[in-house]
Image (spheres, rainbow, N blue to C red):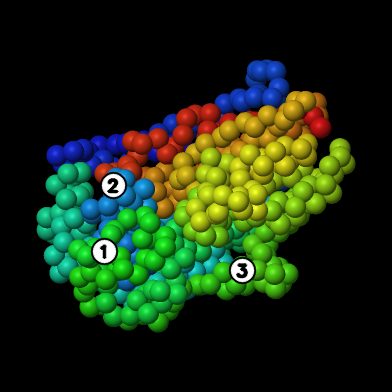
Amino acid sequence: MSTLLPGEPLGAGTDAMYRQLRRGPEEPHRLRSDFTPPLAPARTGGRVVATLAHLTDLHVVDPGSPARLDFAMRSGAGRPAWGGAVDWVFRPQELLTPYAVRSMVATLAGLPVDVCVVTGDNIDNCQTNELDAYLALLDGGEVRLAPAYHGPQRLDWDDDWYWRPDPGDDQYKRRWGFPTHPGLLDLASAPFTAAPLGHPWLGCLGNHDLLIGGASQGQAHLGGLVTGDRKPVELPDDVRCGLDTLLSDPAPLFSGRSRPVPAVPERAFAGRTELIRRHLGHGFTEENVRDGTAYYAYDPVPGLRVITLDTNHAPGHWDGSMDQRQLAWLEDQLAGTDGPDAPLVVLASHHATASMNNRYGVCPDREADRAYAAEVLSTALRCPNVVLWLNGHHHANRITAHYRVGGGGLYEVTTASITDWPSQARLIEIAIEPTGEIRLTSTMIDHAAPATVSGDLADPAQLAALHRELAYNDGVRAGRFGAEGSSMDRNVHLYLPRR
């Protein structure tokens, strides 16, 4: 699998060059033996238990939605009052995200995969039209987010803060040398038909699936806005704007100057029960619908169990936690997988341990009702058959070793997002070596769109390639900020001692 590297500059801005991408040499698999003595070369060739695909943080988005705070990023990004809540609201490539997902799904469809684990933030703003599009991208069907794009990337909105692909001036062209692609907005917003993944896949809910902007439980206050015919374009002058308002009562943030847009009834917010119900057949069961729970166990092949967790923090904010009921359920599940003949266990969740300490809205005397990273990790480590924890949320490739008292442990594998650079998925081959060691081989997957944008943008593959190129050059979060991770977070053989 070749790598993607920065290529020739296509434009020059005051802050950076805009570069095309190019194919580079294949990245070798390195050896990590955090729990076992380092031996070389890597020991491979044992019995393969399963091959998993890991796909996360798709952020299939309706960029013209009136219920998005894209306009708040202009003045709020980096401001302490917002606490990071609007640092990621607008992406120049966001309208093209469905094409990147389409290309990744097509790539994974051609690989030998037993099950694909999809760990949340599948949609961006908890809307039913985003949900419809995301499910169509994985299961096959028509992908349609809105009849047409009406938003600030249009020239007639006369706002040069955003990248506007039609000819004209804007800050992305001035500062980062962004290109001009006339007619792109119409091309990218047209409906298309997606082919199915063709492998079993398991769903998981993330904060953006459940909360407005991934943070706020304000659906009841904004239901009329999201389906309505006005899109806010400025924060109001007479409202205290910041994270506190977003979390407690977001409606005033949307009361500033607005523009008329066509109403789209399909933009209704998706409730928790609807999200669970729409995932039936992808790990979720009727029991989940009845109980309102978003966690389950699934056995994709003999010898392996995937336990999907719900780490969403009910009061709001984007980081995670878990209630004690779910933790007790997890303990019961792991009690049945303890022993040399029991299946290996893979945990899956949206949040990583680094982001599972959300105490927003929890009274100090009720903190015992919630379980945070240390307690959940301790529970997992008590079961020696838990070897892997897959998650996302951080939009970056990371692999962390967690040590078990008495030896061994588990690997926490966090995979980068599809919506942002490097737009990658990951394969994990789980094998048992003749020595009895457990081998987890991680291989990063780039979707098969061309590295360099060079053809007709009416071709969906070219739109997927342009998405990735724009994501790399995004001046706000850009490819130079380390989302790729180190070489030891990507293609690597991970070893665990025998059980």
Q: Earlier in the sequence, mark 1 or mark 2?
A: 2
Q: Residues within 10 Å of mark 2 (few under 14, many from 20)?
A: some
Q: Position of residue 356 (x, y in %)?
A: 56, 46
Residue drawn at x 15%, y 54% is 170
Q: Position of residue 359 (x, y in %)?
A: 53, 49
Q: Residues within 10 Å of mark 1 (few under 14, many from 20)?
A: few
In contact (CB < 8 Å): disc 1 and disc 2 = no
Residue picked out by circle 2: 79
Q: CA distance from mark 1 to mark 2?
A: 16 Å
User: Toward the viewer: 236 or 393?
Assistant: 236
Q: Is residue 387 left or right of residue 391?
A: right
Identify the disc placed on residue 355.
none
Residue picked out by circle 3: 276
Q: Residues within 10 Å of mark 3 (few under 14, many from 20)?
A: many
Amino acid type, residue under disc 3 in the picture:
Ile
Residue drawn at x 61%, y 45% is 372
Q: Is residue 307 left or right of residue 143?
A: right
Q: Is residue 95 left or right of residue 272?
A: left
Q: Earlier in the sequence, mark 1 or mark 3?
A: 1
Amino acid type, residue under disc 1 in the picture:
Val
Q: CA distance from mark 3 to mark 2?
A: 35 Å
Residue with the most extreme left position: 169
User: Toward the viewer: 5 or 33?
Assistant: 33
Residue drawn at x 44%, y 71% is 219
Q: Quadrant of residue 153?
A: bottom left
Q: Quadrant of residue 484?
A: top left
Of discs 1 and 3, which sits in the foreground?
Answer: 1
Amino acid type, residue under disc 2 in the picture:
Arg
Residue picked out by circle 1: 239
Q: Position of residue 432 (x, y in %)?
A: 77, 35
